[in-house]
Amino acid sequence: MLVELFSKEDCHLCDEAKAVLERVQKQVPFKFREFKLTPGDSNFDEFKEMFPVVYINKVPAFKYRVSENMLKIKLQQIAGDERPLDVDPDEPSVEKD
């Protein structure tokens, strides 16, 4: 499973998203790649209003914020794993844009 983070410099939400991804990666193993985009990069204009953007297996999964609960659920669904993950019942399980 591949998780990709598209971020930019000086982006507090990007730093938070990366921290969530790294925390979850310790519980649910996946390959992680980060792309720090700068103006002029091919995807910068596409993502500039949505940073950070997270793709799972090349499919858009999150923008703006990464919910730890939703990330775990999405990874579990993709893996087809029926085992319950350690999901925080106090964290909202619905992603909001």
Image: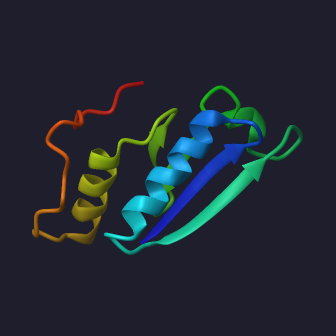
Q: Is residue 56 visible?
A: no
Residue at the image point whose x is 37% and y is 61% from the top: 24
64 over 59 or under it: above or below: above
23 over 10 or under it: above or below: below
63 over 73 or under it: above or below: above
Q: Is residue 77 visible?
A: yes
**Residue reaching furthest right?**
40
Image quarter of the C terminus: top left
Please state the horizontal and vertical placement of residue 74, each as a whole percent of the image.
29, 54
| Left or right: 68, with 20 as reference point | left
How is the protein colored in the picture?
rainbow
Image quarter of the N terminus: bottom left
Please state the horizontal and vertical placement of residue 87, each as a whole percent of the image.
19, 52
Residue at the image point whose x is 61% and y is 42% from the top: 14
Residue nearer the viewer, 53 or 13 = 13
Residue nearer the viewer, 86 or 71 = 86
Residue nearer the viewer, 58 or 25 = 25
Residue at the image point whose x is 31% and y is 61% from the top: 75
Q: How many marks?
A: 0
Residue at the image point whose x is 45% and y is 41% from the top: 62
Please state the horizontal and vertical placement of residue 8, each as a whole percent of the image.
73, 42
53 over 30 or under it: above or below: above
| Left or right: 43, with 76 as reference point | right
Please state the horizontal and vertical placement of residue 55, each as a whole percent of the image.
50, 53
